[in-house]
Image: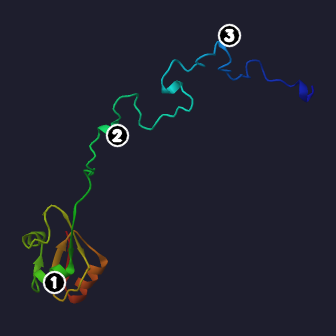
Amino acid sequence: MKLHQIKPSLGMKKYSKRVGRGDASGHGATSTRGNKGHRSRKGFHRVGGFEGGQMPLIRKLPKRGFIHKRSIDISIVNIYQLNEKFSEGVEITPDLLLKHNLIDNINTHIKILGKGNINKKLNIQAHSFSSKAKNKIENIGGKTIIL
């Protein structure tokens, strides 16, 4: 056996379909693309989200924004605000923050940030504290209580 005598097994070699080579070939005229329409044209490219003329889902959805049901609202309070509003030794709770209009809603996640200075001992209850705020409050002698 020589290299030029090697041939693939019967049925293993598939020839490509030669379209557009005249009506006698059986694949002439429309070249197996059907009749008319944008899919039969040269250079056809389907746009993402196209649903065959039906109104696409992306166009049906409202465009006013999306809020995930598990996302949390965070109310931010800076320590300089606490220093201005409250006297020394006060136990600051979410109810007290709402009463003094520092937060809008009692059901939000309250975070204390370290902007400004504090010079009063305060016991602050909140859901979270920034490290800077926690250090400033505890250096004065106040307490940070995580809810």
Q: Which amino acid type is marked by label 2?
A: Ile
Q: Position of residue 39 (x, y in %)?
A: 51, 26
Q: Nearer the viewer, residue 45 or 144?
A: 45
Q: How is the image coloured?
A: rainbow
Mark 2 vs mark 1, foreground winner is 2
Give the residue displayed 68% in from the left and 10% down from the top: 24
Q: Which amino acid type is marked by label 3?
A: Ala
Decide: few, some or many residues near mark 1? Use Cα within 10 Å; few <14, some 14-19, many ≥20.
some
Q: Secondary structure at mark 1?
A: helix
Q: Nearer the viewer, residue 35 or 123?
A: 35
Decide: few, some or many residues near mark 3? Use Cα within 10 Å; few <14, some 14-19, many ≥20.
few
Q: Position of residue 29 (x, y in %)?
A: 60, 16
Give the residue displayed 20% in from the left and 88% down from the top: 141
Residue located beneath label 3 in the image: 24
Residue at the extreme left of the image, as rendered: 99
- Looking at the rendered image, the quarter that the C terminus falls into is bottom left
Q: Is residue 136 above or below residue 96?
A: below
Q: Secondary structure at mark 3?
A: helix
Residue located beneath label 2 in the image: 58
Residue located beneath label 1 in the image: 83
- Residues under labels 2 and 1: Cα distance? 49 Å
Q: Which mark is residue 26?
A: none
Q: Is residue 58 above or below residue 71?
A: above
Mark 3 vs mark 2, foreground winner is 3
Q: Position of residue 5 (x, y in %)?
A: 89, 24
Mark 3 or mark 1, which has the lower sequence index?
3
On the picture, is 115 further left or further right than 27? left
Mark 3 vs mark 1, foreground winner is 3
